[in-house]
Structure formats: structure tokens, C-alpha cells
Image (cartoon, grey):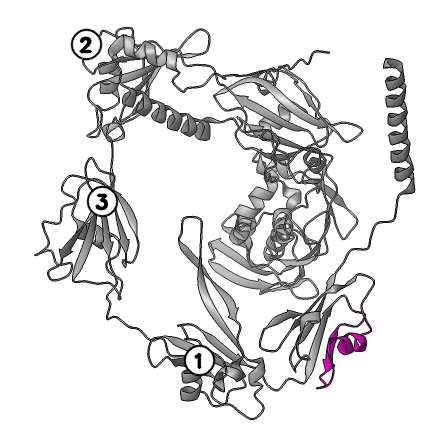
Amino acid sequence: MKNKSYLIILVLASLAFSQSITSAQAAQMQAHGNVTAAEISAAREMLLKESKDSIAKKSLPVQEIQPVMEFESIDKTVKADDPVLKAKKFDRYEKIIFSQSLPSTFYEIQGMVSADYPLKPGDNLELSLWGAVERQLALSVNNQGNVFVEGVGLVNVTKLTLGEAEKLLTKKLQTVYSGITQGRISVNLRTTKLSPTKVYVMGLVQRPGGYDLPGNANVFLALYRAGGPSDIGSVRNIVIRRANGDSAKIDLYDFLLKGKKIGEGLLRDGDLVFVPRAEKLVKADGAIGVPAIYELKANESLSDLLSFAGGLLPNTDHTISLWRINEIGAPEIFTPGIARDFAGGKGTFQMQNGDSIFVFPSTRPNNNSVEVVGSVYYPGYYKWSSDMGIKEAVALAGGLSSEAFLNRAIVQRLKPDSSFAYLDDDFDNTLGLKLLPNDKVIVLDSRVLKNWRTVSVAGYVKKTLNFEWQEGINALDLIVLCGGFLPNASKEEIVIERIIPGEQAIKKIKVPLKNGLSIEYNKDLILEPGDRVVVNIEDSYYEHEIVALTGAFKNPGSYSLAHRGETFKEFIERVASLGPEAYIKGGRLFRKTLASDIQGTEVTNLNYRVTFDFEKVLQGKEKDIALQANDSIYIPFEMLTVNIRGEVTSPGHILWRSDWDTDDYLSAAGGLTINGDEDRIVLTYANGQKIKSGDAKRNPDPGSEIYVAYMPAPEPTKWTEIVTAIGSVATTLTALLVLFFTLK
């Protein structure tokens, strides 16, 4: 039987329409005007940047779902990373009004209390007479509802409005001033100070309860104090229940969106403001005046919603997309029709609770403009004319900026197949290129086309940086831009590492400095492309190296090393004062090191423990260790326990005994659990030395720790799998035997 081997190679390549320049387009550009590779690259970079900026500025608002009751269910059915349905916080329109307004917005003007204001005890009034008699009388409504009027006496104004009280007092004063009847004296009654009004705000509001409001407070102020409606509370069917049993309904949209003043909105003592559940909450987004969540009444439609949302923006041009939750809680999409038809009242579409609409802005191409981008003073869109070339377009954009590349500009043109063509001409239209509507003129940046080299500063400066090389750039200028020298930097000389042309090597140039960074000297330290300025450390520089003492010291604190490289034993004998309760054998030395990120920048301190036997080092029986800056020495107080951790029955501290080994402590802790691994028991002595318990040469000392590792329980034998495997092997052997005897 011949062996056959098959090798199948499948290559799939798909190129989406994009604004990048293809090799074919590059060839077209070169054929048209000898465009260089560097210019093509620069145009590509500029187009990519313009494309990203365009997406950021012009991308359509997406259909986004709100975390408001009915809108939540849509959001929960959508993947979190879906770019079209990504959730965005939307507020109800009235909540935006309440959150952005001051309390004074909802106060009635004290001096302009309407005639239907009901007087109550505590109100202060002013009664004015003018004409033949000029008088002003201060009145106050007492607890019985009476006011005292000079010449008239007590007059009861209980249950009277301000206007009714004025008529009553005018009638009473006619017996005192005959000129009132004759029309020679006029009477006016106004409020000067109102008694507080106690009202209750209940139902679906943020903070239900009782509130003391100004005497002429309205329902808007009451709702403001209560935090506005909840996410599902209604503002279209607010009920005011009076103390006398009367009731009235308030629609806040009449005030907020239609500018109507509602007299019933004025509150009285004992009123109850009740906010029921909203009938229909719908969201409007896209090319409309005020995107938000709005409340609709039962008979209101899509046209009403667009009206509440401020109508359509001028750039609206598409059908409306509508999201709706169906009866099983899943989102569905509808297209009711053209947005302008509904805004003009030509269409009717009934909305449901939880609906969400999106009005798309127009994305149709502009038929009478060209776009100029890049190195001009005023990039943007300009009106196209039939005789317009690159020169005329650039002139409309303010002309070339100082960094413009002067040899040519590139024109991006949309082809009928939706791909792009790239043409070029100079700024005098030497090639006679005429622009078409929707062309994009790209003026390149000369700096992008240059083959830039860099120079860098490293070593003991405050911040190491890279710089673009410029003609005449000075090494000391760059050191200043890096923040100057660090305190331990050598200020006598710097080293310039320079690439040797034609060789894969560098040479080091030592440059002495005169008077540091002074501008009077060092004017000739001019750098070449690729140079690296290195500031070395000052060999004689020395700072305090601080070591901390903590624990059972009589003198804990921070102390300086006597000299670089001072040892642990020297330092302790020179500085430390230990008390009799100090447990030296359990001492620990912690050292800090700087961790670096992926770029090598030092970002954080890490602590690690340097393990050695304090007691033996201080006795001269072990090698000493040199201390470093930021070391921390900890010596605990006397420790008379051994800590048992891991898979034991009763982990914890057990009193130390000199004649106990590891097994004794484990037995005292109740022994190993079923998952305890007796082959992985680690003993850590008080000085930090770790060893497997079976290899330990001495018993645990005070402060030691015994750790028993976890061992997973073995899986039970699956006999069915074993039997199945044996059967498979037997079947295979039988088939082979049959084949053997058949061939034989």
C-alpha cells in the first residue's frame, strides 16, 4: 500500500476599505508626480490621525440603555463589550432640572403673592391707604385668625384669601373713612412675611416625609426638598390632597416644558403631595435638542416625545430606531418611520413603557465643499468651485504654516467603488490638478518627512530624557531641561558617547565643565545626532545611610552608619542597647530594594529578609554582614512558643519545651488532617533558617514555626473506565488476530 502525504495550504486575506495608501495607490501617485516613499509614509500617518480624530468627533451616538427600572432589562441582555449597546448614564429630564437648579428657583416672590393666597395665623400684612388719607398699618394674623385694624377693631380673616381679606377690610374701613366710598381713598392689602407651611411629600420620591416650607411655597419646591421623583415616580400626574378633602392634579411638564403657571401648585398647611408611578418612561437620544428620559401620558405618542425633547436638530435625516422590551423581557428593534414626519405631526406612533428611541444625524456626503487638513493656519471645510486647485484651497485655509512641506500636497479622492485615489500637485498647480467636491487636500509637515535623530541624557540628573536632535543643540541645555544635576552628580565633567561613523562602535569624549551650568562657559558643547550625554556620580559624595532599630531595644529609632560598609556586629555594639527580655536568636534583618517596571524605571520599594543567626554573629561564631541604607533590624521580645500552621487539627501557638521535637508539637496540635502532607513539613527556626523537618539536626527553638503543606485527596478509582479500557484493548487484539490469519 502506497503511503500518500497531502499538504494543503490555505491563505485567506481580506482587505476592508480604509484610508491607508495601498501599493497600487502609491504607484499611481508616483506616476502622477514622482512621490517619494517618505512622502507616502507621511501622508499615511496624517490620514490615520485625521481618521481617528474624525471618528472621535463625528462618530454617531450609539443606542445606549439606561439603568432606570424598565431600561435595566435591556442592558442585562447585552454583552458588556458590545460597542453599539454599551450602557451610558441617562437621567430623566426633570431630574436634570432639579439637580441643576437652586432652591430659590422655586420660591414665589414674597412681595407679589397672588390674590388667591389663603391667609393663615402667623402671616404679617401691610394695609395701605392713599389719596385723601395717607396711612400704612402693620397687621398680623393671630392664632384665632384675627387682625386688629385701628378704628375698626378685630377682623376675622380665617379661610379668606388675600384678595377676599382686602375686600372685607375695605368695607369695614368705609365706616371710618368716607372718602373710600367716594373714591378719594384707595385701599391695598399685601403680605410682608408669610408663616411657614407644613406639607407632606409621599409616594415615589427620593426622600418622602414632612417638610416646613415658606408660606407661599409651590409643589415644585416641595418636590425639590424631597429630592425629586424616584426613577419611576411620575411628574405628570402629581396629586395634591388638601386638608379639607379637596384634591388637585399637577403636570410639571406644563410648567417645565410649556411655560404655563398653575395656580393649584400653591401649597397650604397640611397639604399632602403624592407622587404616583409614571405611566410611560421612554428615552430619547441622538440628533435631538435635549437627550434624556421623558414621561409620557397614555394618549401621548412619538410626536409628543420629540416635542418634549426639544425637537430635531438641523442635521437629522433618517428613520428613527426604536428599542422595545417584548413580553418575554428581550429587546426588539422597530423602525417607526422618518424622524421629520413625526416631528412635523405627520406620523403617529404609540410609545410603550421602557421604549428607547435613537434619532440618527445625517451622514450624507457634502456636495459643495473640499476639506483642507495638515500644515495650514485654518484647517477645515471650504466651499468648492469648479476652477479650484490646491493653491486656491490652501489660500482659503489661511495659507501654508511655517512647518509646511513646500514641494507638494496630496489630494485624497473618493472613487465610485468606495476606495480612495491619491493625487498630487504643488501649490502653484503646475500639474493643473482640479479639485472635485469632497476632495481632501493634505498639506504635509516638513518635520515629519525629515529623518529625525535623537540625543539623550542619562546618569545622575533629576530626570533622564530623550530629545530630537536640532542643529546647534547644546549638552548643558539638555541637562538643564532634565532638571539639572542630582546632589551626588559629578559637576566637574560629563561624558559624551558618540557613534563612530562607518563602525559599529562608540567613542567616549570626556568634557570638563567650567563653572557648572553657567551660560558664560561651555558654549561649545554642541551635540551630533545619536549622542548620549552621561553624567557620572561624584566618587567622594556621601550621604547619611540610615538603619532602623525596632522591637526589644531600649533605644529604638533610626541611626546613621558610622561609615559605608559598617557591619551588623559593629553597628549593634556601637549603637544598640538591648534589654534582658530581648530574644536575640529570633532577630531579623529586612532590606529594601527598588523594583522596576518594564521600561526599567524604578517604581516602588520591596522588602525582603536577610537570614542569618544574630546570636552567632554577635558571638563571632559566624561571618558578619555589611549593613546598607534603609536596612531595618528587628529583635523580638522573649518568645516562649512555637507556631503551628497548615494542615493540622488545631493550628496555633504551643508553649515551647526544650526536649520536644517537631513530632511532639504536631501531636500537641492534634496531628495532621486528612489533607496533611507528612513528606512536606517545613521547620522555620527563629532566625529565619528553613529546613525539612526530617532533616533537622536540632529541635525547634522559641519563636520557631512548623508548617504542614496541603495534599489533595487521591481521586477514587473509576472501575468503569478501567473495564472499558480493557475491553477496548481486547477488541483491538482480536481484530489484529483475525487480520493476521486472514492474510496468512
Q: Which quadrant would residue 45 be assigned to in this image? A: top left
Q: Nearer the viewer, residue 181 or 396?
A: 396
Q: Which of marks 3 and 2 is nearer the N terminus?
A: 2
The image position of residue 638, as x and y in percent, is: 62, 87
Q: Marks 1 and 2: CB-CB under 8 Å?
A: no
The image position of residue 739, as x and y in percent, is: 87, 18
- Quarter of the picture containing the C terminus is top right
Cα separation between marks 1 and 2: 83 Å
Residue type highlighted by circle 1:
Phe
Q: Does the magenta stretch include residue 94?
A: no
Q: Residues within 10 Å of mark 1 (few under 14, many from 20)?
A: many
Q: Which of 365 and 530 is in front in this view?
A: 530
Q: Which quadrant would residue 394 be assigned to in this image? A: top left
When the figure is inspected, residue 724 is found, relative to residue 194, above or below; the finding is above
Q: What element carries label 3?
A: strand
When the figure is inspected, residue 414 is found, relative to residue 172, above or below; the finding is above
**Residue at 63% from the left image edge and 76% from the top image edge:** 685
The residue pinned by badge 2 equals: 430
Residue type highlighted by circle 3:
Ile
The residue pinned by badge 3 equals: 506
